[in-house]
Image (tube, rainbow, N blue to C red):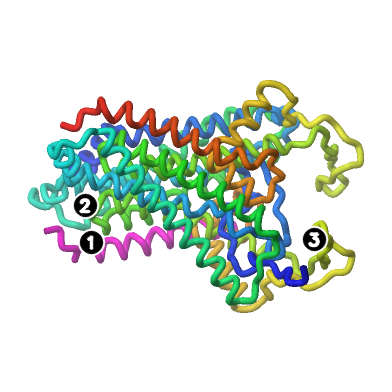
Amino acid sequence: MTKLLRADLTRMRKTKGFWVCVILSFALSVLNSLIFVPDIRTAENTANQILSGTSNSLVLIAIFTALFLGTDYSQNTIRNKMIIGSNRTAIYFSNFLTVALGAFVISLAEDIPAIAAALFGKSFGMTANEFAFQMFIIVCAVIAMSAVFTLLGMLITAKSANTAISIVAAFVLSLGAAIIMDLLAQPECMNDFIITEDGFEETENLVPNPMYIKPGIKRDILTAVNDVLPTGQIMQLEAGNLHNKEFMPLYSFGVLAVSTAVGVMVFRRKDLK
Amino acid sequence: MENKIVLGMYDIDVRIPRSEPVFGVGYERSQHCRYEKRHITGRLERYVFSAIFAALYLGADYTGGAIRNKLILGNARARIYFSNLITVSAGGLIYFAAQITVILGLGHALGGRISEPLSPLLLDILVDLCAEVAMCSIFTMIGMMISSKAKIVAATILTMIVMTYGSFGLISMLDEPELRNKVELDANGYYYATEDTEPNPRYLKPGTKRDIIAAACKILPTAQELQIEEHYDISDKCFLPLYSLSVLAVTTAAGVAVFRRKDLK
């Protein structure tokens, strides 16, 4: 296991794609901060600015994971690993730990420019403890997501298909979380509207909002999914509207445990030819 | 005019919600998205499919070594490039047709009717078609320049995402008002907007920078798509297909030039 891990870490260090993802993550964050510059002197809540870039780096993490794990299959090195007597569980865990470290580095590269920009702000808008806790939630969510990407990367043998599926998964999970949050945030009532020649016009009377989800099983399920999904947690952090935040690292750990357990089980039985 | 049922009511909206800070720029979200008028055009999601299809299709030539067979048969490289471009664009147009068919078919089956006069709608469809072809030509250029299938997949999807987010950012930069309401803290620690206005530091003054951004918003196919989706009042909309065609011309010229010199081993 140690040898495998050492080999994987060296390979990650030598993978160009990894450093491209780190640099892109850094560059996107610099761009993000530069756009934020006009507001920086009067900005009241710069902490939120730091937290709100994570979803950009998720796609990069998906790309890195897919390229890194796919190489084992495309170059057939996975068979070499088996031949020297490593067992499949060790291969899986070593890959997961490497990928999790890579994901952490990519999200760190995303945070550094944002933190630098935040230091120029008027006020941080958050106590140090609170900020540290929210960063901890993000790290847990990122690691849970890399467990999900590892699951995909270890089970799908074709590198290009895996790349496409991982990126789409990152997208779908982020958008899905955003849609769920959007649904939960719908107000119960809304202003009625009438249709005029120029289009829609709002009136004063309130009508029930058809998009509002009434308290009940459906709402409970959506709330739970929103809290458990790592992307849902990231979206909530970005919106600055946290629900159940004490449990979030635990939920992330649960996602990690479930996806790794499923991954190891299926990978053990996988036909590697 | 009485059949003004909104077609888009039946069309689940799966775009990036507008409240999400995109490049640090916040958006106001409409609470009435269900009643918002939605065109059958301006659906950005299909670019994801186009990107994946283009990458898998073009990458297969390299992994299978088929590209060398094509060359051995005596095909000029430019011809290989063009035939790939046409195939990828045809794929993109099929996605486009499928999308319109589903939205129109489902919408109509559920009782929706097109609320627009037909000619602006047809113009929008034309703009969309040209934007789709322009995007496909960008994907083809990327696919012909890189030799590894997995890297092509990553590069095309990443390009698509960066272009989409970039267009969001650029459009919202142009949208910034010149003045904004001052925000103050009340006794309970909540922010509220006062009646006083102050100059908006994000406002782009008329000048070269604004002109460049405005031009980019017209030329980028993703920006065209977003503006049509959001019913922006685009001045001289009929020129947008021409911009798309110029994107097609430039990317294809660059792609052919690079591909001619590429070492195919």
Residue A144 appears in the figure? no
Q: Residue furthest right?
A: B195
Q: Which residue is mark 2?
A: A91
The answer to whether the residue labelled 1 contacts the one labelled 2, judged by CB atoms less than 8 Å apart, is yes
Q: Which residue is mark 1?
A: A267
Quarter occupied by the C terminus of chain A:
bottom left
Labels 3 and 2 share a subunit: yes
| Percent position of residue B132, x then y | 48, 47
Q: Is residue A82 left or right of residue B51?
A: left
| Pick the front one: A41 or B132 | B132
Looking at the image, tell me whether mark 3 or mark 1 is earlier in sequence order. Answer: 3
- Circle 2 marks a residue in which chain? A
Q: Which residues are magenta?
A: A245-273
Task: Name the kind of residue labelled 3 in the image.
Answer: Phe
Q: Is residue B41 left or right of residue A20?
A: right
Residue A212 appears in the figure? yes
Q: How many marks?
A: 3
**Residue visible at 58% across and 76% down in the picture:** B109
- Circle 3 marks a residue in which chain? A
Looking at the image, tell me whether mark 1 or mark 2 is earlier in sequence order. Answer: 2
Q: Which residue is mark 3?
A: A200
The answer to whether the residue labelled 3 contacts the one labelled 2, judged by CB atoms less than 8 Å apart, is no
* Position of B262 relative to A143 (above/below): above
| Percent position of residue A61, x then y | 40, 44
Distance between the alpha carbons at the discs numbered 1 and 2: 10 Å
Mark 1: secondary structure: helix
**Residue visible at 74% across and 65% down in the picture:** A187
* Position of B218 relative to A264 (above/below): above
In this view, the mark in front (3 or 2): 3
Is A264 inside the magenta-drawn segment?
yes
